[in-house]
Amino acid sequence: MKSKIWLSSPHMGNMEQVFVKEAFDTNWIAPLGPHVNGFEADLQGFTGAGHAAALSSGTAALHLALIMLGVKAGDEVICQSFTFSASANPIVYQGAMPVFVDSEKETWNMCPVALEEAIRDRMDKGKKPAAIIAVHLYGMPAKMDEIGAVAKKYDIPVIEDAAEALGSHIKGKMCGTFGKLNILSFNGNKIITTSGGGALVSEDGELIAKARFLATQARDNAPHYQHSHIGYNYRMSNVVAAIGRGQMVVLNDRVAARRANYDRYVRLFGEINAKGYHIELLPEPEGFFSNRWLTTVTIDPEKNMGIIREDVRLALEAENIESRPLWKPMHLQPVFADAPFYGDGTSERLFDQGLCLPSGSNLVEDDWQRIEAELLQLFV
Ligand SMILES: *Cc1c(COP(=O)(O)O)cnc(C)c1O
């Protein structure tokens, strides 16, 4: 059996183990310490965000964001439907109800028109949404100017789920700095990883200070253990943060490598499309910069001689090459069957026709030759 080519696997640099050893040498083996502070400073420096709190996961960061915006049982929260379930689950942790909004075709992220339609209809039905969760899927920034304008018009706070978009930006303004509270993830397959981890990012220092307080069991300032709030155990460990500091050293290289992957797929599918196929990639709109976390294609069988997405996925799998359908929209998930949805079928079509291709920053020439040979053979 040939070695497995992963969709996106961890890619360590030279400094991660140095920082981890330092944590051991100084016995900072705790959910606080100099690497946690250092990693937060690195994230602020990289994104230009005013404040960052390193947490145990992106999901925990989203949960805290909702708590701090006062989202409570019975509220409604608008969420992009085309995303990973972790974008929506924390809404339900709070006893609130997700209201799902479809994507537009240029970035595959939240459609500002459908967003406004959803807000108006929810208000007509008697409830103003408490927050909006916009996602930058696969690294492509959402249309934050338009989404922000709608949010401002109705005075609803925006949470940016930038879990997949560290290093992406719109005209130089980094993803993670558009919303009132924004989240990052460092899970195992993200563009950089700490094995598991996340962060909450904001311009509002008071909110971030409060997030740190809630994330460390909400202990009041007293010699004994005194509590006037319900707390959480959501802080990042100093050992995990050590990995993060090492990964920050190579983040720009990782973005460059992933973008080079995209360019190589553009050339490959250019060659394939010249044979009469019509496989589509997702170009960047003017002013948009994607970290190209994953390269994705859509395969419309009507334009590709009947070849469907699954044909491609299974052919790659037979060669031990991992690929994956695009996210199944949340409004089609059994667990969210009762949630309202506003849209025109865009995300459903993307799910039907879309595929994520191997996109690791650690792909080697030998991997590429296997991927290219298999795809060129499938699209004869
Ligand atoms: C990975 C991911 C999350 C969750 O982050 P974790 O750190 O795994 O909890 C949330 N939203 C999106 C879009 C993600 O891709």
Image: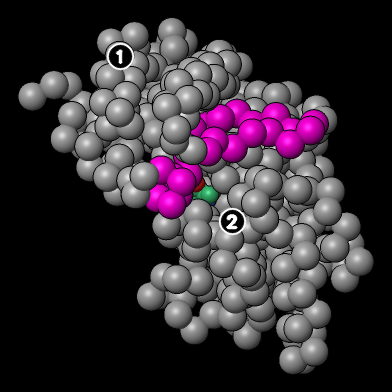
Question: Which image quadrant is residue 284 in?
Answer: top right
Say if the magenta span includes residue 301: yes
Could you say where residue 157 lies in the image, as x and y percent from the top left?
79, 62
Tell me the amino acid under the disc marked 1: Gln
Tell whether 220 sits left or right of 12: right
Q: Nearer the viewer, residue 183 or 344?
A: 344
Give the quadrant of residue 240: top left
**From this viewpoint, is residue 154 visible?**
yes
The image quadrant where one finds the C terminus is top left
Specify the color scheme.
one colour
As displayed, is residue 292 above or below residue 220? above
User: What residue is drawn where x is 66% and y is 45%?
Assistant: 107
Closer to the camera in the image, 303 or 192:
303
Q: Are marks 2 and 1 in contact (CB under 8 Å)?
A: no
Seen as rendered, the residue at the extreme right is: 153
- Secondary structure beneath label 2: helix
Q: What percent of the width, then of the height, locates residue 193?
A: 45, 30
Examine the image and state in which quarter residue 35 appears: top right
- Mark 2, residue position: 62
Dot 2 beta carbon under 8 Å from ligand 1? yes
- Residue range of the region highlighted in magenta in the rendering: 280-304
